[in-house]
Image (spheres, rainbow, N blue to C red):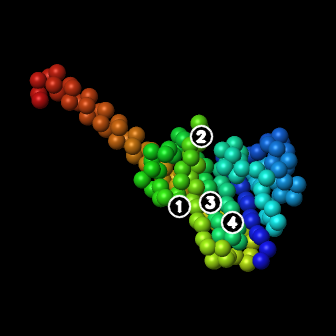
Amino acid sequence: MSEYQYYEFQAIDRPLGKDEQATLRACSTRARISASRFVNEYHWSGLKADPMKWMKEYFDAHVYLSNFGSRSFHLRFPLALLTSETTRDYEEGGTLETRTTPTHLILSFLCEEESGENSHDDDGEGLLDLLLPIREALSDEAKSFARQLAEFRDLRRRRSSLIARLDQAGLT
């Protein structure tokens, strides 16, 4: 059985500049690289870079799969939207991991299978596009939660202010 590894990265929140694309090109001469994507498959070697470093520096989404059982899906969010405190309860040993950079949180969904188990004869082309709505849904939920939390804090502040005024008036 030949080796197969598929890497796809996507920049969503901002396009990659020419210098960034050149840095990526230095790691792979065969990859399809644009201002928003890096896509490559390997049959005898692997990516000559650290995918997590690329997630920290360049990309907002990444999918990896291989015919020897490794599968991963990574999403990057601005810390203003999602933090490790809000995701901590969902971390599963070896299934969901989080990493924090100074500006972002990266969610990593991981799956390791026995070699050959559920192996895919076809390539990973299009897989990331199928998974990207998850990022949008999580972003929307995080924004909704942030709005609700802000409203709750505002209500608490107004309640405290009202109680203080009632105390001053001797009505409590």
In primary-sequence order, the first of circles 3 and 2 is 3
Residue at 75% from the left image edge and 65% from the top image edge: 5
Residue 75 placement (x, y as % from top left): 60, 53
What's the mark number on residue 101? 2
- Answer whether residue 77 is visible to the viewer in this image: yes
Can residue 34 be seen here? The reply is no
Q: Which residue is mark 4?
A: 65
Q: Element at badge 4?
A: strand
The image quarter in which residue 19 lies: top right
155 sits to left or right of 15: left
Tell me whether circle 4 and circle 1 mark residues in contact (CB < 8 Å): no
Q: Label 1 amino acid?
A: Thr
Does label 4 or label 2 sit earlier along the sequence?
Answer: 4
* Total labels drawn: 4
Marks 3, 1: nearer the viewer: 1
Which quarter of the figure is the N terminus placed in? Answer: bottom right
Farthest residue, direction top: 168
Q: Position of residue 29 (x, y in %)?
A: 88, 54
From the viewer's perspective, is 150 left or right of 27?
A: left
Taking 68 as reference, is 165 left or right?
left
Label disc, if present, on residue 127 of the rendered structure: none
Q: Position of residue 69 (x, y in %)?
A: 65, 70
Check disc 4: other Cα within 10 Å, few if <14, some if 14-19, many if 20+. Answer: many
Which one is in front, 91 or 34?
91
Q: Quadrant of residue 78?
A: top right
If you read the primary sequence from the N terminus, does the residue marked by circle 4 or circle 1 appear first?
4
Q: Which residue is mark 3?
A: 73
Q: Secondary structure at mark 2?
A: loop
